[in-house]
Amino acid sequence: MSEVVKKFMYLNRKAPYGTIYAWESLEVVLVGAAFDQDVSVMFVDDGVYQLTKAQDTKEIGMKNFSPTYRTLGDYEIKKVYVDRDSLAARGLTQDDLVAIAWEDMETEEEVDNIVEVIDSARVSALMNESAAIFSF
Amino acid sequence: MSILHTVNKSPFERNSLESCLKFATPGASVLLFEDGIYAALSGTRIEPQVAAALDQITIHVLGPDLRARGFSPERLIAGISVVDYAGFVDLAAEHDVVQAWL
């Protein structure tokens, strides 16, 4: 396998459950995590709804995949970003979103929550740094 | 003729709700379900349009879709009521026509 580490961004713009995009993206993120690249997971527009707390799908007959986001840290993903403007347009704040913990098994470095709310200029900058953007 | 309008798309991604509110006439009912429930939440960019529509029409939201997406009734715009699946059926039966804004 190549030793070159590339910056991959997964760009999520769809709400969960209404379409299959959110679930498909999460599956690809988890599969891609095995390839030891520099991964960031970005949530903009309706994609921010994927991270809402307290999702309870038992009455709609669909799998609740929101707990899986909280495991992203276990897949050595440390960069999860949310666009601030997208949250504000939807009346949401970071308090409405799940927290994703991260821990380095070797150094025991811990981060309580890797979900970072960032402004649009930073979103653009991170896109510009990416070698590939996977859009969902 | 009384019409039940249904909207199942996010108001931030499609113009389904916008068209629905444009063409719904006084006395009509709107049911928000699936990704349409996001239009019922308070504090959003589109809350003013939804709140204004409530003067003329009744708006309902499907509880199971609201809960699936992580929201409780306390987050709704005042005046919007929650219905369950049986309530959805009742609404359809009470109106002459169901118009789905896909």
Image: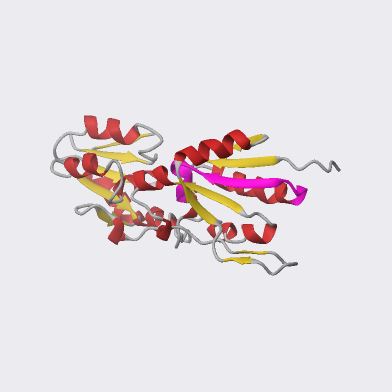
Does B63 appear in magenta? Answer: no
Residue A67 appears anywhere in the view = yes
Q: Quadrant of the N terminus of chain A?
A: top right
Residue depicted at x 20% and y 54%: B78
- Which one is in front, A57 or A73? A73
Query: Left of B71 or right of it: where is A69?
Result: right
Q: Which image quadrant for residue A11?
A: top right
User: Residue A31: image x %, image y %?
Assistant: 71, 49
- Which one is in front, A5 or A45? A5
Residue reaching furthest to the bottom: A108
User: Residue A132: image x %, image y %?
Assistant: 66, 35
On screen, A102 above or below B61?
A: below
On screen, B98 above or below B37?
A: above
Residue depicted at x 29% and y 33%: B18
Residue depicted at x 67% and y 61%: A74
Q: Quadrant of the C terminus of chain A?
A: top right
- Which one is in front, B52 or B2? B52
Residue reaching furthest to the right: A1
Query: Left of B78 or right of it: where is A106?
Result: right
Query: Left of A68 or right of it: where is A122?
Result: left
User: Residue B13: image x %, image y %?
Assistant: 41, 35
Q: What range of the chain is rendered magenta? A: A34-49
Residue depicted at x 45% and y 57%: A97
Does A44 appear in magenta? Answer: yes
User: Residue B16: image x %, image y %?
Assistant: 34, 33
On screen, A20 above or below B79?
A: above
Q: How is the image coloured?
A: secondary structure
Residue A13 appears anywhere in the view = no
